[in-house]
Image (cartoon, rainbow, N blue to C red):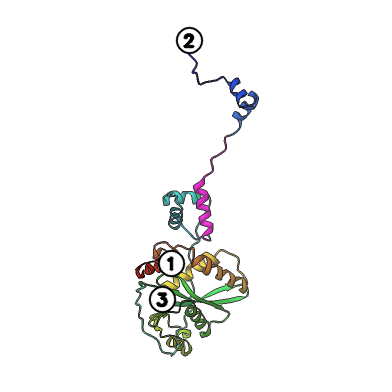
Amino acid sequence: MIQKTHPNLVSLSKACVLIQVSKSGYYQWLKRPTKATPDILAQKVKRVFHQSKKAYGTRRIKKVLAKEGVMASRKLISKKMKEQGLVAKARRKCRSTTDSCHKLPVAPNLLEQNFTTSAPNQIWVTDITYLATTEGWLYLAIVLDLYSRRIVGWRIDKRMTRQLVIAALHKALIARRPLPGLICHSDRGSQYCSQDYQEALQAHEIRCSMSRKAECLDNACAETFFHSLKVELLYGEPMMSRCRTEQSVREYIEVFYNRQRLHSSIGYVAPCHMEAVYEQSMFQLSA
């Protein structure tokens, strides 16, 4: 039986003439190894992982990719991380900085571990932590807004004094200008119980709240921030000088933490985004 040639088919010789290649060149092309298709998802997972300073696990990476329109399960993301040796930094236990062995007056606990609030500048929490450097310790005092988890004031110094916490408070007051009645919660360390710090609160009509003795969970939000900072910025990295450490902390807080880092407690958005949404909703209500 004679098979009819399909009218749309041409011979190899004619096809080579039409595309202006030699038959030998065509056969050489056939023998070349096929290039592997780039694993786009793996590349995206790696990019998000490094942008997070090697801190994000599968849950947060999934959230970031979803915002970019890339849908992937945590199981698949975990597989891509393992293939590339990407392991999120683990948390460590931090040292306590609270000096509560004093006879200064202590304020009542107004929060009682209720860390929810309906608007910015209603409740702040503040605390101090140690930062190790090649030149000795640095001490970081922060003021955090509970609504958005944004760091609204911070200060670093070589000494852990009442002036350190007052400076962090003043920085927050200048940046935020809160209305009277704001609650500012801290532990019962001597810096926060000092007369100078208490006078600074009273001058701005701020209500003072303090944790119970030896109860770190009463100030859990500040402790959580310090854990995040140390895990994502310092642990596993070469120790730096005091100057370089301060620069790195500034970049972490002002660039990454406040503006980019996703927070599970506020719906996996960044603090600045949380506040921007609030301001937009207030504007629409007043319009």
Res. 111 image quadrant: bottom left
Q: CA distance from mark 2 to mark 3?
A: 88 Å
Q: Secondary structure at mark 1?
A: helix
Compared to residue 93, the image places residue 73 above or below, namely above
Is residue 140 something that shows in the picture? no
Task: Decide if residue 25 is in sight here.
Answer: yes
Q: State the image quarter where residue 199 is shown.
A: bottom left
40 in the magenta segment: yes
The residue carrying mark 2 is 2
Give the mark nearest the N terminus, 2 or 1: 2
- State which mark lies toward you, 2 or 1: 1
The front one of 156 and 119 is 119
Foreground pick, 150 / 230:
150
Query: How crowded is the residue under tag 3: few (<14 C-alpha within 10 Å), some, or many (20+)?
Result: many
- The residue lying at 58 percent from left, 73 percent from top is 246
List the residue tagged with mark 1: 276
Task: Name the residue nearer the viewer: 195 or 5.
Answer: 5
Q: Which residues are magenta?
A: 34-52
Which mark sits nearer the N-terminus, 2 or 3?
A: 2
Q: Position of residue 197 (x, y in %)?
A: 47, 86
Which amino acid, by three-letter code, is at mark 1? Ala
> How many numbered marks does the figure carry?
3
- Give the amino acid type for the residue marked by disc 2 in the picture: Ile
Across and down, in percent, residue 147 comes to: 39, 71
Q: Residue farthest to the top?
A: 1
